[in-house]
Amino acid sequence: MLTTSAASPLIHLHASDNVGVARARIPAGTVVVLDGVGVTALAEIPSGHKMAIAPIPAGSRVLKYGQTIGVATADIAPGAHVHLHNLTMQESDVAHHFAEDGRATELLPQAERCTFEGYVRPDGQVGTRNYIGIVTSVNCSATVARAVADHFNRGGGLEGFPNVDGVVALTHGTGCAINTKTEGYAYLTRVLGGYAKNPNFAGILMIGLGCETNQIEPIVSREGLVEGQLLRTMTIQGLGGTRKTIETASAIIREMLPIADAAQRTTVPLTGLKVALQCGGSDGYSGISANPALGYAADLVVKHGGTAVLSETPEIYGAEHLLTRRAVSPEVAQKLMDRIDWWRTYTERNGAELNNNPSHGNKAGGLTTILEKSLGAVAKGGSMPLEAVYEYAEIIDRTGFVFMDTPGYDPVAVTGQVAGGCNVVVFTTGRGSVSGFKPAPCIKVATNNQMYLHMHEDMDINCGGIVTGEDSIAAAGERIFEKILAVASGAHTASEDYGFGDSEFVPWQIGAVT
């Protein structure tokens, strides 16, 4: 930020910017002084919204963060409110440079790296939670799965097993009427297999109906799963109906509970930590406060040997050039561009566009175009080299900073990241969010003081002081990093205390339903 005084009502982010962002509501007639020059607000500028600080002729570029966020649809005078009425999207035309930074990931010396207290699983992965999961192959087995989970979570079935965090029913709305040769089927089976392998689960029970297209046996085979004490499968038709399935499933989970309860946290390196970086309900402050603070924390995770996973491809569109230059190789950069191209084709064939974003709430909070939103969203990824690009729900097998291709819709995006192995989620929000993502604990980070005070019971960290000038990105980033380590070691988040996370398992449904 170039603004030097916290008393200034406007945040000027880059020397080349022709707009600034209001720290709080700026009444019409207010004189804002930047670099010794006064600019009078010609209209009220809502909190988080943009005000022109220089003449912007119609058809010329509007700049924020030193980058183009769109073009002016009319002449914009200094002091004018810049938003939907005079700023529009343009197709991103930024130049892409591949792997030009030439940096290796900067790791701290081994003796200086932080640790956390986690559950080491037999395959070497590390859990931050200790759940038992019920994976449903099809929507038809959802009710049975919920009934079994409710027996343990609400019916006293976990008494005597204090070390088990709960039983999670992973239910969804698909599993049949899909072609097994399509992307949608591949995504669904990857998600189910990935959740079965996520280290936050001590045991997994897979329940199907029996006649569905998405058969359990191929999932087990394709995903390299091995049935045993802590991985069991069944079908409702095979067992003879609802009651018999619930009884059998409950008996199996009772067998798993003593084994799961015996797991103990031990001190482990951050190589066992995979952090999903997310934002939702964003506002004009997201790219100024919480997102760059999370990016700072993500850099610390990587420097200490862990993995930080950025996602939501439609919400990096227009800012992907900031990632391709950080790629460790041209091949990694090209894979990211290939996913962007896939999204262009995907949205076109569905009669949509990448600028379907920002949402209603984003716009009310001051975001005008997807280019502007993306430039703020990509800040969550920090500054480390981009080590790898993964397709949706692929297992994340590299440490460092990586990217996963997902939609921008938060539940679908996080589902892909958790399927990939993420065991903690950090979620920034400017408008407010109340979601959780079992089995991964979710840390909520507020972008501004007003929302934090209004919804503080749902928030874990406040970055609003960055906006007011009372806090710094580095200090807030350190707090987020410390919170990540505490939560990974067992400290509860607000969303966990409220019990969120049972309804946010949403595999990406793509393709025809027949």
Image: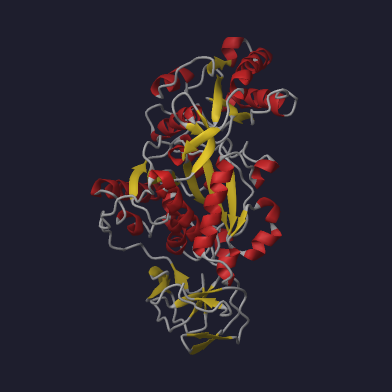
Horizontally, is 101 left or right of 84 in the view?
A: left
- Using the rendered image of the protein, determine whether residue 311 is visible from the camera's viewpoint: no
Q: Residue at x 45, y 64 (%)?
A: 372
Query: Compared with residue 374, is residue 331 higher up or lower down, i.e. above or below?
Result: above
Between 427 and 491, which is closer to the camera in this rendering? 491
Q: How is the image coloured?
A: secondary structure
Q: Position of residue 66 (x, y in %)?
A: 39, 71
Tell me the quarter of the picture where residue 90 sits: bottom left
Horizontally, is 109 left or right of 229 in the view?
A: left
Query: Compared with residue 501, is residue 223 higher up or lower down, i.e. above or below?
Result: above
- Using the rendered image of the protein, determine whether residue 69 is visible from the camera's viewpoint: yes
Q: Position of residue 302 (x, y in %)?
A: 41, 48
Between 170 and 186, which is closer to the camera in this rendering? 170
Tell me the quarter of the picture where residue 111 sits: top left
Between 267 and 130, which is closer to the camera in this rendering? 267
Q: Residue at x 34, y 52 (%)?
A: 385
Horizontally, is 186 left or right of 446 in the view?
A: left
Query: Compared with residue 200, is residue 105 higher up or lower down, i.e. above or below?
Result: below
Q: Residue at x 58, y 79 (%)?
A: 7
Residue sitting farthest toward the right: 155
Q: Position of residue 229 (x, y in %)?
A: 54, 15
Residue sitting farthest toward the front: 111
Number of disc labels: 0
Q: Position of residue 166 (x, y in %)?
A: 65, 30
